[in-house]
Image (cartoon, rainbow, N blue to C red):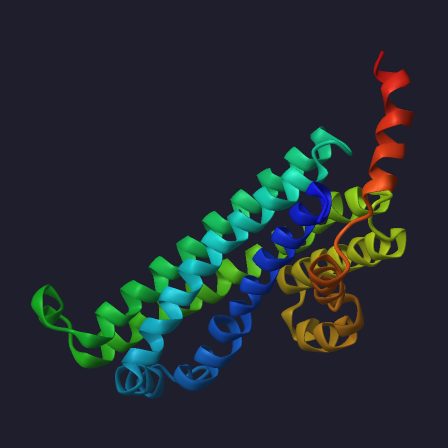
């Protein structure tokens, strides 16, 4: 296995680990959160506390994996365009920080729902209202993060399209994916009523990350194409 292909496979493995996302973004909330019902949400979270805690752990690990993924991708693409690769890393670091902020909101919400200690000064309805507010803040942080879920894909897609050791069509697909996430984030700010409709409509674009993950894992990268790219770039650098 060539060094380039090995680096691509490592990035693909990081991407595969990133599949934790649906667990803490979709499954855990579906089992623990009741929209617009603080009392029911508090009851569910307390009765499914272990699952909720696993969600907190998975979301924290998700931030770590996201950073590991982008560092692997930086290593893969740094010879294509180091400036764009650094942009990609910077956007992911901001996104990972927002993920961890959301984890803090949910962790504090669990603490509030459990009560005891200093929280005994508040009655149950007040604790439920505060806890629900924190849960919603977690949701809002994810809403803001949708912007960065899209923005980091723009330099990533550009690097894939420019690399010549990965298919150009994958790069264009990733660019479309990133644009769709940005549109979804802007819609969430301006008119959330259309968010669900757009999310369903954009599903084909969102599959771009699954496609690049599978390509990196199964096919890897073409070493000869990279060498040709570097040879073409060297006269310009001199």
Image quarter in which the C terminus is found = top right
Q: Is residue 127 above or below residue 176?
A: below
Q: Which of the pair 176/164 is nearer the observer?
A: 164
Question: Extreme top residue here?
Answer: 238
Give the x, y percent position of residue 83: 71, 29
Question: Extreme front residue here?
Answer: 1
Give the x, y percent position of residue 14: 57, 56
**235 with respect to 139 (left or right):** right
The residue at 35%/83% (across/down) is 41
The residue at 82%/50% (across/down) is 166
The residue at 52%/61% (across/down) is 142
Give the x, y percent position of residue 224: 86, 40
Residue 138, image quadrant: bottom left
Give the x, y percent position of residue 57: 36, 65
The residue at 43%/68% (across/down) is 136
Q: Is residue 45 above or below residue 174?
A: below
Residue 104 visible at all: yes
**141 with respect to 120 (left or right):** right
Q: Which of the pair 233/48 is nearer the observer?
A: 233
Residue 152 visible at all: no
Q: Is residue 105 above or below residue 156?
A: below
């Amino acid at each position: 296995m060539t060094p380039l292909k090995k680096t691509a496979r490592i990035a693909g493995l990081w991407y595969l680990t990133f599949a934790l996302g649906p667990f803490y973004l979709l499954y855990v909330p579906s089992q623990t959160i009741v929209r617009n019902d603080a009392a029911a949400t508090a009851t569910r979270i307390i009765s499914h506390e272990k699952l909720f805690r696993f969600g907190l752990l998975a979301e924290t690990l998700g931030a770590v994996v996201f950073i590991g993924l982008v560092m692997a991708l930086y290593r893969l693409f740094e010879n294509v365009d180091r400036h764009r690769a650094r942009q990609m890393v910077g956007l992911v670091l901001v996104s990972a920080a927002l993920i961890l902020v959301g984890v803090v909101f949910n962790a504090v919400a669990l603490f509030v729902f459990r009560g005891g200690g200093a929280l005994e000064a508040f009655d149950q309805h007040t604790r439920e209202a505060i806890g629900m507010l924190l849960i919603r803040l977690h949701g809002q942080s994810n809403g803001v993060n949708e912007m960065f879920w899209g923005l980091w894909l723009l330099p990533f897609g550009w690097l894939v399209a420019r690399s010549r050791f990965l298919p150009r069509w994958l790069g264009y697909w990733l660019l479309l994916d990133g644009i769709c996430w940005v549109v979804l984030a802007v819609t969430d700010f301006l008119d959330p009523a259309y968010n669900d409709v757009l999310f369903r409509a954009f599903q084909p674009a969102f599959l771009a990350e699954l496609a690049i993950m599978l390509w990196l894992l199964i096919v890897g990268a073409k070493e000869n194409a990279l060498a040709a790219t570097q040879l073409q770039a060297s006269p310009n650098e001199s």
